[in-house]
Image (cartoon, helix red, strand yellow):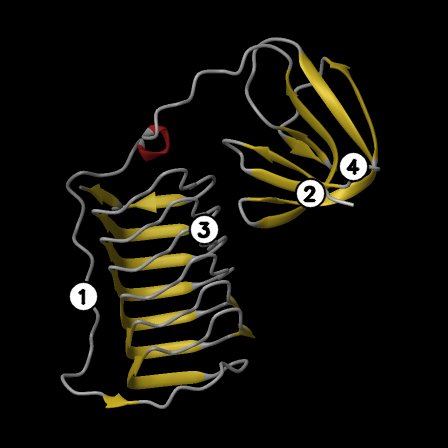
Amino acid sequence: MGRYQARAVPHRILAHVHPLAAARSELSKHRPHGWRGRWLVNGAAGPLVALSLDPPVRARLLGLPIRLRELIAGAGEEPPPRPQTDWLRGVSRNSVLPQPPRLPSQVEEAPNGALEHDATLSDASLSHVAWAGQHAGGVRLEAVRLVSGDLSGARLEKLRLDDCELTGCELANLEGRGIQATRVRVQESRLTGIAFPEGSLCDVVIRGCRVELSSFGFAQLIRVTFEDCLMAEASFLGAQLEGVRFQG
C-alpha cells in the first residue's frame, strides 16, 4: 500500500501519510505557526482548513524532525509567491570579503577510507572519496583539499571544516546539523538539498554550485559569499546573516 505525501512551502513541511490513516478536515479560526504538533502551512488571509491526523505522523521542517497531528492550510486561493529575495533583506552589499583557506603549499595524498566517529584528518589531499550515505559524528577536516568527493546523503552531525577547499564534489542531501565551517571554499559542486540546521559558517565562499532546496535554518552565517549559484527554494528561516553576499 502506498503513502501520500504532504508538502508545504514556504515553511517546507514534508510528511508521508498512509492512505488508511484516520484523517478529518474542518474549518478553523486559529492561526498557529507551529505548536504541539499543529502547523500552519501558509499565510492565507481567508478561511483555513484543518486536517487532523490520527495517529500523528513524523514530518520534517527545514530538515528538522517534527511531530504532525494537525495541518492547517488556507481554504481560499493560494497567495501569490513571495519574491525570492524576501529573505535577503538586511544583507550587506559592502561586506568584508571572506578570508581564504589557509592551506599548505604541499599536502600529501591521503588514502580513502570510511568515516569514523570523531575522526580527524589534517594537511591532506583527497580525491574521489566514496562517503555517500555514511553516518558519523564529530568528524573534523583541517587544511584538506577534497576533489570529486561523494558525500551525498551522508549524515555528519557536528562536522567541522577548517581551512578546507572542496572542488567538483557531490554533496546533495548532506545532513550536517551543528556544522562548523571556517575559511572554507566550495566550488563547482552540487549542494542540492543540503541541511545545515543550527550550524555556523564563517569566511565561506560557495562558487558556481547548485544550492537549490538547501536549508540553513537557525544557522549563523558570517562573511559568507554565494557566487554564481542556483539558489531556488533555499531557506534561511531563523538564520543570522552578517556580511553575507549573493552575487551572479
Q: Position of residue 112 (x, y in %)?
A: 39, 86
Count of marks, rendered view? 4
Please tell me which residue is depicted at 35% across the width and 24% down the height of the picture.
83
Kind of residue at badge 2: His
Q: Earlier in the sequence, mark 3 or mark 1?
A: 1
**Rendered view: 145 above or below 236:** below
Looking at the image, is mark 3 or mark 1 nearer the viewer?
Answer: 3
Residue at the extreme front of the image, as rendered: 1
Which SS class for mark 4?
A: loop
Residue type pointed to by label 3 = Gly
Mark 4 or 2, which is nearer the eye?
4
Residue plotted at (53% across, 34% down): 11
Task: Residue 100: give its label.
Answer: 1
Mark 1 lies on a secondary structure that is: loop
Label 4 vs 1, first from the N-terminus: 4
Q: Secondary structure at mark 2?
A: strand
Which residue is label 2 attached to? 16
Circles 4 and 2, Cβ within 8 Å, touching? The answer is no
Task: Kindly indicate whether the residue at mark 1 contacts the one at mark 2 (C-beta within 8 angstroms).
Answer: no
Three-letter code, disc 1: Pro
Q: CA distance from mark 4 to mark 1?
A: 51 Å
The residue that disc 3 covers is: 193
Q: Nearer the viewer, residue 183 or 231?
A: 231
For disc 1, the neighbor class at 10 Å (few under 14, some 14 to 19, many from 20) is some
Q: Quadrant of the C terminus?
A: top left
Name the disc covering residue 19, or none.
4
Inspect the image, locate mark 4, and give the three-letter code of the amino acid beneath it.
Pro
Q: Position of residue 49 (x, y in %)?
A: 70, 17
Element at label 3: loop
- The residue depicted at 66 percent of the width and 9 percent of the height is 47
